[in-house]
Amino acid sequence: TTRLVASQIFSGQASNITMIIGCRPLLNRKYKPPFRLPAPGYVNLRGELAQRTLADPSDPLIIDLKDLSLENTHELLKWHFRVNSVDQNVANVVHERTGGRPLFCLKYAQALKTVGGLALDDNQDLYL
């Protein structure tokens, strides 16, 4: 039936149609989606970019990326390694050595993990 409705919409036979698509609520604790929801800042940035692109696509887009705070570095590491928690010492070392630059944070932490400087315990906690 979905294909039939879609074909009618695209052919112009049906012009006033409302489709309701159901799914499991993402905020339901019983259901864990197989992905992590993006940070609110990322969602806001995507919305701003979409509006700007529609306004005038010929304008150059300049995004001023700032260094991450210690808290943001902690969250980035938690997200990147998909762990339950990150030891505060890990975030401190990575932030101190990289100055909070997002790409450097990820590369430095990955290098630490590669050489055995970071470890995971049974609870999926990342530590030095």
Image (cartoon, grey):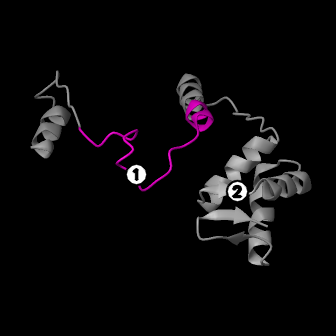
Q: Earlier in the sequence, mark 1 or mark 2?
A: 1
Q: Is mark 2 on a helix, strand or loop?
A: strand
- Who is closer to the viewer here, 126 or 79? 126
- At x 59%, y 59%, the residue is 82
Quarter that holds the C terminus? bottom right
| Tag 2: amino acid | Val
Marker count (numbered): 2
How crowded is the residue under tag 1: few (<14 C-alpha within 10 Å), some, or many (20+)? few
Instruction: Give the magenta part as a residue range.
Output: 22-45
Residues at marks 1 and 2, CA–CA distance in whole angstroms: 21 Å
Residue holding disc 2: 86
- At x 85%, y 52%, the residue is 92
Residue 6 place in picture, x, y as percent: 17, 39
Residue holding disc 1: 32
Tell me if 91 is positioned left or right of 37 in this view: right
| Tag 1: amino acid | Lys
- At x 70%, y 33%, the residue is 60
- Who is closer to the viewer here, 15 or 63? 63
